[in-house]
Amino acid sequence: MVWTTLMLGLGTSIWSARGIHAQPAPSVTTAADSATRLRVGAFVDGYYAWDMGRPPTRDRSFAGGALFGTQPSRHNEFNVNLAHIEVVLEAPRHRGRVALQAGSSVQANYAAEPTVGQVSGPSVQQVIQEAFAGVRLGRRAWVDAGIFFSNLGMEGWVSRDNPTYTRSLVADYSPYYSAGARVVYDATPTLTARVDLVNGWQTISEADDGKGLGLRLDWKPADGRTLSYFSLTNAEGGGTVRHFHGVGASLARGPVTLLAEADGGILRATSTSSRWYGLLGVVRTELSPTVAIVGRLERYHDPDRAALSTGSIPGRGRVPDRINPGFRGNGASVGVDVRAAPGALWRTELRGFRTRDALFPNGATGASRRTGGFLVTSLGVGF
């Protein structure tokens, strides 16, 4: 059984950093008037999921314990995927957003936050979805500082911003959020550029002296068409540097929406380097004003665990346990969206994976297998 996102929401403004994965960089020059507005919103996304592997701890994880994706993160359990409240400021020369959050996807996504000192780590940072303030520079640029959504990818943190309910592997294993400062510049009426200086690869609590430099370019030649390039280079301490690059395209024509992404990275250490890549294709078709179907194909290749750690895989008989065999596999999903009311969406999705190594749990036996999958249904409501 499955539940998908039913959301009503505070509409995404032209500058809002929310959904930056799924949408072009926020525009600068569009239609700012002399009014100052303060808006308040809230959103709750509840779900039920059934994992075919029936993990005994109910965490949807690999047999070795490495979390597999950030949503839905619990098996055979009614839970909240994401709930947030927000306050948004819009003014001619100032802007900002503060959003506080909770939910099982939040706990999963922030689990790797470093704990250094007394006021850092996931228990401190995971409640902040965004908290940034911005100032307009001239007519075409904004400077923002604080915690904001990442510059990477074509999918967003909030499921209502995406064509599928669950996020693809290319999204789940690249940053959703950053802490630092950014400049957003409308170079032309169709081209928006964004440059970020951040603490690192999805890091709020700094664990070393290195910093990350991000870039995003969104070209929108016509309504419903967007081409994007995004990158992040991050010094991770000890001579290790991570380079990440990606391209994406979104095309909406009539009832059909197409989304594609290809990204990859290199993790360079003093004497070694590791590479990974991901591919994504999504087709969404509206059958009526209230019903849509969506299909997805994806591939993720990370043999050296540069971005996705797979934990240890239990052996059988004389075969010893394998530690971090790497992820090399494909995935597919099909979903149905029902807009039950204005601003409300009920989404159901069936998703499956097949990998080269046996990475997925197989019930309570402690064994593992090469195929995995789940069914999830979600209802989200917002205002």
Image (tube, rainbow, N blue to C red):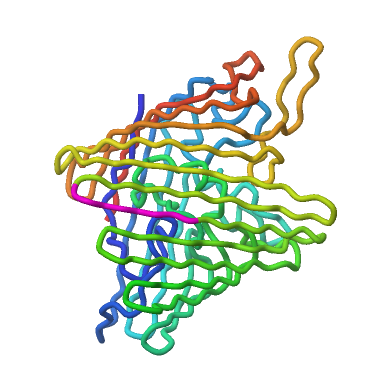
Between 178 and 22, the one nearer to me in the picture: 22
- Give yes or no for residue 291 being in the magenta stretch: no
Between 15 and 73, the one nearer to me in the picture: 15
Residue at 36% in and 69% down: 88
Percent x, y for residue 256?
A: 24, 45
Q: In the picture, which quadrant includes the C terminus?
A: bottom left
Name the main secondary structure of what is drawn in magenta.
strand
Percent x, y for residue 314?
A: 72, 21
Question: In the displayed image of the protein, which residue is found farthest to the top?
Answer: 317
Q: In the picture, which quadrant includes the N terminus?
A: top left
Residue at 45% in and 26% down: 374
**Residue 159 relative to residue 342: left or right:** right
Percent x, y for residue 294?
A: 31, 37
Residue at 27% in and 64% down: 222
Question: In the displayed image of the protein, which residue is found farthest to the front?
Answer: 221
Residue 11, above or below 342: below
Count of marks placed on residues: 0
- Rendered image quadrant of residue 135: bottom left
Question: In the displayed image of the protein, which residue is found farthest to the right?
Answer: 271
The residue stretch that appears in magenta: 247-254
Question: In the displayed image of the protein, which residue is found farthest to the bottom?
Answer: 138
Residue 55, above or below 333: above
Residue 212, above or below 268: below
Residue 208, above or below 264: below
Residue at 37% in and 39% down: 46
**Residue 232 relative to residue 144: left or right:** right
Percent x, y for residue 137?
A: 43, 87
Between 114 and 138, the one nearer to me in the picture: 138
